Image (cartoon, helix red, strand yellow):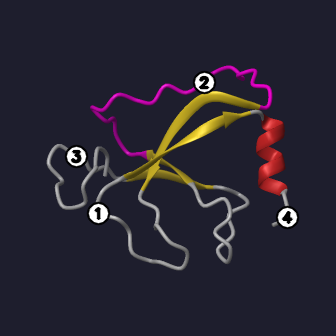
């Protein structure tokens, strides 16, 4: 479903069949690491597509630029209940070196 913000209000949304599902190759069912998937829709949406970078950004260390991401994720570890309203969070843009350091660090 495209355009959904509130689970109880489906007005203005679009429903499509799924043409292709591409799960992250490192997804782990036991830890939920790499828990994201690309879904190719079986049709064209009336919603504007996201502008994706076609070139690599040159970021050194941490940036003051904040990025916004959203999803229907659970809000606590071990929970299986999804929120009724789409969640969003702002995260700082970081260099690849900082990103890989954070991803690979041992807690």
Residue beneath disc 2 = 53
Q: Mark 1 vs mark 4: which is more N-terminal?
A: 1
Mark toward the start of the polypeptide (3 vs 2): 3
Between the residue at mark 2 and the residue at mark 4, the CA separation in whole angstroms equals: 30 Å
Q: Which residue is mark 4?
A: 106
* Mark 3 or 1: the one toward you: 1
Select label 1 or label 4 by which is in front: 4
Residues in magenta, as a range: 41-61
Q: Where in the figure is residue 14, as x and y percent of width and height?
A: 24, 46
Crowd class of label 2 (few under 14; some 14 to 19; many from 20; radius 10 Å) = few
Tell me the residue that label 1 is attached to.
Answer: 84
Give the answer, above or below, for where 23 lies relative to 14. below
Q: Which is more N-terminal, label 1 or label 3?
A: 3
Helix, strand or loop at label 3? It is: loop
Disc 3 to disc 4, how far (Cα)? Answer: 42 Å
| Image quarter (top left, top right, bottom left or bottom right) of the C terminus | bottom right
Position of 28 compared to 87: left or right?
right
Q: Position of residue 36 (x, y in %)?
A: 57, 56
Mark 4 neighbour class, 10 Å CA radius: few under 14, some 14 to 19, many 20 or more? few
Q: Depth check: 74 or 64 in front?
A: 64
Q: Which residue is mark 3?
A: 13
What residue is at 35 percent from the left and 53 percent from the top?
86
First in residue order: circle 3 vs circle 4:
3
How far, Cα to Cα, is label 3 from label 2? 26 Å
Q: Is residue 31 above or below residue 97?
A: below
Marks 1 and 4, how far apart in space?
34 Å
Query: Quick one: label 2 or label 1, which is nearer the N terminus?
Result: 2
Q: Residue at x 83, y 56 (%)?
A: 104
Quadrant housing residue 42: top left
- How would you classify the magenta stretch by its main secondary structure? loop
For residue 18, side relative to residue 30 (left or right): left
């Amino acid at each position: 479903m495209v355009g959904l913000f509130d689970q109880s209000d489906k007005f203005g949304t679009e429903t499509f069949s799924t043409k292709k599902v591409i799960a992250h190759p490192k997804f782990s069912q036991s830890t939920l690491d790499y828990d994201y998937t690309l879904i190719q829709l079986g049709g064209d949406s009336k919603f504007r597509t996201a502008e994706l970078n076609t070139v690599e950004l040159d970021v050194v260390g941490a940036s003051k630029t904040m990025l916004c991401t959203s999803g229907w994720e659970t809000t606590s570890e071990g929970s299986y209940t999804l929120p009724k309203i789409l969640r969003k969070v702002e995260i700082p843009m970081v260099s690849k070196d900082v990103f890989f350091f954070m991803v690979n660090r041992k807690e």
